[in-house]
Structure formats: C-alpha cells, structure tokens
Amino acid sequence: MKISNITGILFSILVGLLVFFVGIDVQSNSAPNKIYKVYLNGVTIGLIKSEDELINLIDEKQNKIKLKYKVDKVYPPKGLEIKEEYTYSNQINSVEEVYNIIQDKDPFTISGYTATIKYPEEVNENEGENTNKKEPVYLNLLRKEDFEEGFKNVIKAFVGSDEYELFVSNNQPEITDTGSKIETIYWEENITLRENLINADSFIFENEDDISKYLLFGTLEEQKKYTIREGDDIPTISYNNMLSTEEFLVANPEFLNEHILLTPGQTVNIGLIKPVVTVVAELHVVEDIVNRYKTEYVDDKESYYGTQKVTQEGSDGITRVTEKVLYRNGEIQNLVIIHNLSQEITPVVNEVISRGIRSYSYGGFQYYSGGSWQWPTANPCIITSSFGPRWGKNHNGIDISGTGYRSPIFASDGGVIIVNEFHYSYGYYTVIDHQNGYMTLYAHMAEKGLHPVGKRVKRGEIVGLMGSTGSSTGTHLHFEIMKDTVFRYSNHLDPCNSIFKC
C-alpha cells in the first residue's frame, strides 16, 4: 500500500472522530425541551408547555356551562389527547391558541351518567324469525339518582304507588278472602347506568320528572291536555280521546281508579303513552267472579212453533278463583286461573225454556236452528281487555282468559263457517255467519278451527281450542261480533253491550 493512501485514510478517521466528539459536546450544552403535543380527534393542533395550564384554562373559561348545568368543573372534549414529547424546536403554541382551536372544533364535556336501554330480541313463534328491529336508547343525565327516581316513578304509574311501596318494603298484607299480592316486578330491557363525560351541547336530562315523562311518553313534548267539565268521568274522557282507562290512569297517576270523581276545571293528560321501557308485574289474585248461566231449550211437541215459556229461571253463580296474572305496562297480558283452587260460592242455575215445535200446516214438527246467544268460552273466565280504544286504535272485540290452553271455544249461535285460516295478528281464527245479520269472530286459537269453510254449526258447538297464536302474549280468546256488514268491512259491536251482559 502506498504511503499516500495510508495517510488519506488516517486523515479521514481523524476528521470523523473530531466531528463525533464536537457533536457530543455541542448537544451536551443544549438539552431537548419537554413539551406536550395536543391532538383533537387524531389530528395535531399544537405544542404546549403545560398540560395542566390547558386543562385549567378550559375549566376557567366555561362558566356559562357551569351555570347552565350547575356543575363545578368543565372538561376537555372526548376527542382531545395530550402526549408528552421532547424536542429542540422553539415553535411552541400558547395554551390560549390551542384553546381557541378546540373551542371552534369540538364541544367541551361535563361529568355525568349515560343510561343505556337495550331491547331483547323477539322471535315470531309462527315463523321462527327474529322480528326485533328496535335500536338501543341512550339517555345522558347529570345525576344517577334522577334516573333511579324517575324510573321508580314509572313503575309506580304502572303498578300503583301504594302497592309498590308495600312490595319493596315487604309489607304486603296476606290475602284472607279476596285480594291481590305482587309476587315480582321486573323490566324486560337490559338497563345499564355508567359514569361518563358528556358533551355539553348534547341534550342532558337534569331532573327526575323529565326522565319519568320521557320513559312514559317517549318524548318531552307537551302532552295534549283536557279541561274537565261538569258531568265528565274517566271512562268517557278516555273513550273520547282514543285511550283505554288503563292508559288514562298511567298518564295521570294521581287518580287511583276510574271511579274517582273529577273536579270541573281540573286539567288532565290525554296524550297516548308510548313507554320506552316495559315494566312487568306478576300478581297472585283471589277474586269472586260471575259464573254465567246458560239457556237450555226443551222441545215441546204439544205446543205450536213460535211459542215458548220459561220453565226455570236462570241465575248466575259466583266462583272464587285464584289467578296468576301478568301485567305489562299496566295491562293484563296473561292470566291463568288455578282451577283446582276454585271455590263455588253460589251455584249456577241454568235457564230452561220450553219451546213449541208443532207445525200449524201439516201436523209435523218444525225445529229451531238457533236460540239466545251463548258465551263463547268455558267458565270460570275473565275479560282481560274490553271493547274500545287501546294503544291509540280501537280494540274491536273483547279478550277472554283463564279457561286454560286448548280449552273449548263455542259457537255463540248457529251459523255457517265463512273463514277458517291463519292471520299474522289474529293467528288461527274462525268467522261464523249467523245468517241473521250477525257474524262472530274467534281468534288466537291453538290450531286451525275444527270445521271447514261452508260447514254449518249449531249454537254451543265447539269450533276451536283456546291458544295464543298470532299477535298474542298469552292464552286467550279474542272475540268479535259484527252486524249488518260484509266481513273485513265490519261494523263492530261491543259484545258486552249488544249480546251479553258482562
């Protein structure tokens, strides 16, 4: 190797070492600065010297938020992130500059709570498909106590304030003769409550009354009001405004029952409730119910056709029944009578009518095809939903419960089967044309009706079995009566004010 090459290599090494040590010496005299890089929703918006100064400035500047919500502290937006870093750069932002950027881009937050209401999946039993499309509901609130009290007020509206307090205090009186006792109260939704930072410009519930109102009506908008006039009563006000009496009482929990006397000039809610939650109460009930008498006909060959006389007066009986009743948001959804605990208080005496069948013309006999109306279910039973307004629509019949799954359904009068099919709402149902201007409908049967279309049935003949198909939450019969109509374009009558005395 030439001397000149060796010399060049040595010189390069010497220069490199010099630069290295000089560099170390220069950096040792200038340490990097600790700063804080500020990100908003993932985007860098500045470098500041003090994280605490920015946080404190946000709190100091937002007195308007503090006054509005009566809170002591305001926090940065949820999307704000501050990371500690080191740099030699002297280009540092003031906390005021960064604050102004934040203020223009994202809302500040306050400490509160978020209630989440998640709805259970619902399966259509007849189709086996998930039919629930309801999205979760999120409520922002300042204090968890407001939600707890507001939710408690909703429960009281559905089960009664006194009844609720006796239940939670475990002081319900024992049933001696008749009465009721709450066995359990629960709600169908999954409700969680967690502490959270809430955007100050979002809607925040600030008191329990607003929470109660929203959970009952699904809105905070002012509900429709009615001013009571002389002669008004709760059933009439409810009917005239497409409410059931149960819905009226929930919307106006200050009234304990539909028989309360109203004061002229008093204002009441007549808005339709649309509960955000589903409060379920299961009750043990013992009550005396009417066991309706039946009319029996005896053919008299000695008397002429068209004549009849009562040979035995009928009278209703009284039966003391024990029931398990399930209420959903104040309405009976399922009722089961425990028949082995039923006790007859007063026996039924059936009416007996002797009617002539002798013909005037040819000396033969002429037989009746029908008679008085017969109750469509076995006894004892209970009407769980009356004819009239329900959920903002008209309930065109009555619901009868308590006789048990697959118990018999009777034709209320003789006639011809004109419908025997399945409907998404009615489930399996049958319609009888009585060929006297009346038709009757029997819905939610356990299976298809027992007779085909075109078949003539007699009064009291079994036409189906009690079930819970279609839009039904428990075993019951939905019974309708129509007059002077073509089916599906129906003039519905209240069965309890037309053919029966309920």
Image (cartoon, rainbow, N blue to C red):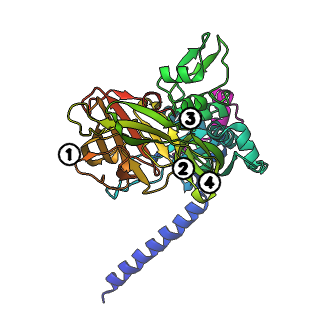
- Report the magenta residues as a range: 58-80
Q: Earlier in the sequence, mark 2 or mark 4?
A: 2
At label 4, the amino acid type is Ser
Q: Is residue 26 visible?
A: yes
The residue carrying mark 3 is: 216
Left or right: residue 440 versus residue 388 is left
Determine which of the numbered discs, if any, sits on residue 454 in the image: 1
Q: Is residue 399 magenta?
A: no
Report the Cα–Cα distance between label 2 and label 4: 14 Å
Q: Disc 2 or disc 1, which is closer to the eye?
A: 1
The residue carrying mark 2 is: 335
Report the Cα–Cα distance between label 3 and label 1: 47 Å
Q: Which one is nearer the viewer's eye here, 298 or 13?
A: 298
At label 2, the amino acid type is Leu
Q: Earlier in the sequence, mark 3 or mark 2?
A: 3
Disc 1 crowd rating (10 Å Cα; few below 14, some 14-19, many 20+) is some
Report the Cα–Cα distance between label 3 and label 2: 24 Å
Residue located 20% across and 35% down the image: 362
Q: Earlier in the sequence, mark 1 or mark 4?
A: 4
Q: Which one is nearer the viewer's eye here, 69 or 120?
A: 120
Q: Is residue 80 visible?
A: no
SS class, disc 1:
loop
